[in-house]
Image (cartoon, coloured by chain):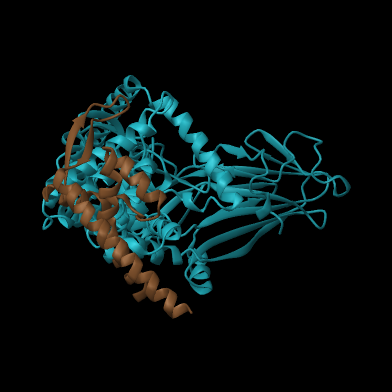
Chain colours: A cyan, B brown
């Protein structure tokens, strides 16, 4: 799909592709400049226009109704560069290869430029469209999706800064130029490519050639552009409302997650980030990013809806981009710093006790669990309930892992694990975890919660109970009986609950993992 | 480069002569003139012709009339004026003198 314009050249109407039109327009302008000191320059220009009209009408036929970029390029090559009109010394240089080199100059490899002529904001989308040979509108739609997902603005601004604007005709030709040099049809590869291209062109002409279709297409495009503008506005308003709620709600409104309770982002940040300074920095970064993207969305919407172009848009959007980028940089720095705290995993095992009974009964102790008082956080695919006390974080949910025993007794081991930015800090955090359980005869009383100091932050602290089950024995938990397969027959079902892992939830219920998703951790 | 320049100068000098000659017996519109000149490899790009035509017309050696065309825009048919014919005759004489002189010199030097 390419935009076409209708032009009147010396009394004859032509449908001409927009880029071809721009090229032609530019050529005539340069010609006028080149001839300005020549006597009768106006007449020469008119004669040239006549000639162009003549060639154009010769190029059109029943099946071809639109003048394409290539047609104009051919014409301009035939007419010669504006400098050739006067400087006849150049005309000389011998025939054919000169024409070719001239054309080669025009049709150098395609380059990415910003297209200022068909731009709404910075011409980035139009330029990308030219480069990839697709309509700018499609690029804009794709960008819109990117912007919704949050990274589009940055990409746009980076491209805006990095990609040069097509200023001269040569730039414009390079920007739109076919990747195939038509003139080097000599070799077969190119001629094949040429065939494909002309085939594509004829199809394109069939689709877009009809002026009615064209008009319809243009109207459709305007409609989509308007919708896109409205979309930006709508998204901007949504963002703004969210932002206002956030500000007016005193930063404590937005839940990090949950149906059991709310946790403000600030509090969550304090639980995860290493220092108060980091929390503030993330705030600043986040606010920068948020404010600039809200304003950006409004500016984009305005530009698309009203097609306003002013020299200020560049500064405004550039400034917004700077804000957004610095916001992102701040967040990334803090993110990396925090991420380093997850680099090392260490765990410690504590022996709890052994039992010679035929069956081990596990009884969860839920006395500390208050329904509705916890924060629900999703981590590693399962939910984690948190309760925050003065200087400790209480976490609910204990993993249970079943492994075969090497003798005829049950052995129970408490496994505490955590992450840190070094092996030592990870180990220290593991040691700081407090979790209580008690083995009395054949019954294991297990606290459903464990706690660790608030200063340790959330660093994947986990408590697992490893239960070694002797052959033929079983574990009873929350009305389930858990067997392990025999050594010769390990893992095969003699009983529905033969799998090797589960979790005692904060409310005391037991989830047995029927899929093997965490089994790789079990191979101790 | 220098060689190319000389060739260009030579061509340039006779281009006006050739245009007048083309128009001597019948009127023609620019495309026809371009065709003839291109066939003779006197011009490479069409742009060269237009300033020349305008110059000749302003010097009243050529004149033109408009004619509608079925296949495209109206055409500007150029024809030679009386003054143009006289000038062409003069040019023709100059050309044959030059031709003689040149062939005499080149013959002598190649001997």
The answer to which image quadrant residue A364 occupies is: top right
Q: Is residue A470 above or below residue A230?
A: below
The answer to which image quadrant residue A244 occupies is: top left
Front-lying residue, A500 or A265: A265
Front-lying residue, A496 or B108: B108
Q: Where the N terminus of chain A falls, by quadrant?
A: top left
Q: Is residue B17 left or right of residue A248?
A: right
Q: Is residue A487 left or right of residue A134?
A: right
Tell me, yes or no, if residue A120 can be seen here: no
Front-lying residue, A86 or A344: A86
For image coordinates 25% across by 28% down, the residue present is: A13
Q: Where the C terminus of chain A falls, by quadrant?
A: bottom right
Q: Residue furthest right?
A: A488
Q: Residue furthest top?
A: A212
Across and down, in percent, residue B29 comes to 27, 38
Across and down, in percent, residue A33 comes to 15, 55
Q: Is residue A1 left or right of residue A504?
A: left
Q: How many marks?
A: 0
Tell me, yes or no, if residue B52 can be seen here: yes
Across and down, in percent, residue A132 comes to 42, 46
Front-lying residue, A403 or A243: A243
Q: Is residue A287 above or below residue A502?
A: below
Across and down, in percent, residue A318 comes to 20, 56
């Amino acid at each position: 799909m390419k935009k076409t314009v209708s032009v009147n050249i010396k009394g004859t109407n032509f449908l001409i592709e927009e880029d071809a039109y721009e090229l032609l327009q530019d050529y005539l302008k340069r010609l006028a400049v080149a001839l300005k000191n020549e006597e009768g320059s106006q007449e020469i220009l008119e004669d040239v226009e006549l000639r162009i009209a003549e060639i154009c009408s010769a190029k059109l036929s029943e099946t071809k109704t639109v003048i394409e970029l290539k047609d104009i390029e051919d014409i301009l090559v035939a007419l010669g560069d504006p400098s050739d009109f006067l400087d006849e010394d150049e005309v000389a240089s011998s025939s054919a290869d000169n024409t070719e080199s001239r054309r080669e100059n025009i049709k150098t490899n395609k380059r990415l430029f910003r297209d200022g002529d068909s731009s709404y904001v910075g011409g980035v989308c139009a330029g990308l469209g030219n480069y990839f040979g697709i309509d700018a509108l499609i690029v804009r739609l794709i960008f819109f999706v990117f912007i919704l997902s949050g990274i589009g603005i940055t990409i746009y601004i980076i491209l805006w800064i990095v990609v040069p604007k097509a200023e001269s005709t040569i730039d414009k030709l390079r920007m739109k130029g076919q990747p195939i040099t038509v003139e080097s049809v000599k070799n077969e590869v190119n001629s094949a490519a040429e065939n494909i291209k002309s085939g594509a062109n004829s199809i394109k002409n069939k689709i877009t050639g009809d002026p009615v279709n064209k008009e319809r297409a243009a109207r459709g495009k305007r409609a989509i552009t308007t919708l896109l503008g409205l979309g930006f506005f709508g998204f901007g308003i949504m963002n703004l409302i969210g932002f206002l709620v956030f500000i007016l709600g005193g930063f404590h409104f937005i839940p990090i997650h949950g149906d059991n309770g709310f946790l403000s982002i600030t509090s969550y940040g304090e639980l995860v980030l290493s220092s108060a300074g980091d929390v503030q920095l993330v705030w600043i970064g986040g606010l920068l990013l948020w404010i600039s993207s809200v304003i950006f969305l409004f500016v984009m919407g305005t530009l698309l809806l009203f097609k306003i172009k002013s020299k200020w848009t560049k500064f405004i959007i550039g400034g917004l981009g700077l804000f957004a980028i610095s916001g992102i940089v701040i967040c990334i720095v803090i993110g990396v710093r925090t991420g380093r705290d997850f680099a090392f995993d260490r765990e410690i095992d504590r022996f709890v006790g052994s039992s010679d009974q035929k069956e081990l009964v596990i009884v969860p102790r839920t006395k500390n669990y208050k329904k509705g008082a916890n924060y629900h956080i999703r981590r590693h695919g399962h939910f984690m309930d948190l309760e925050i006390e003065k200087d400790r974080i209480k976490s609910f949910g204990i993993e249970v892992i079943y492994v075969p025993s090497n003798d005829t007794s049950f052995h129970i081991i408490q496994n505490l694990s955590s992450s840190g930015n070094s092996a030592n800090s990870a180990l220290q955090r593991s040691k700081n975890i407090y979790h209580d359980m008690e083995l009395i005869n054949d019954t294991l009383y297990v606290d459903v919660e464990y706690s660790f100091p608030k200063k340790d932050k959330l660093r994947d602290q986990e408590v697992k109970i490893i239960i070694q089950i002797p052959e033929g024995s079983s574990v009873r938990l929350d009305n389930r009986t858990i067997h392990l397969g025999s050594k010769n027959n390990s893992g095969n079902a003699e009983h529905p609950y033969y799998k090797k892992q589960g979790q005692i939830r904060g409310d005391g219920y037991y989830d047995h993992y029927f899929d093997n998703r965490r089994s790789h951790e079990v191979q101790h | 480069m220098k060689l190319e320049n000389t060739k260009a100068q030579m061509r340039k000098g006779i281009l006006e002569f050739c245009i007048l000659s083309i128009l001597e017996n019948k009127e023609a519109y620019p495309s026809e003139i371009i065709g003839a000149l291109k066939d003779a490899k006197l011009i490479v790009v069409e742009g060269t012709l237009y300033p020349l035509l305008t110059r000749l017309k302003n010097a009243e050696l050529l004149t033109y009339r408009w004619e509608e065309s079925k296949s495209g825009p109206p055409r500007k048919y150029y024809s030679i004026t009386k003054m143009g014919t006289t000038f062409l005759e003069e040019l023709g004489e100059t050309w044959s003198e030059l031709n003689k002189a040149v062939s005499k010199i080149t013959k002598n030097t190649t001997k």
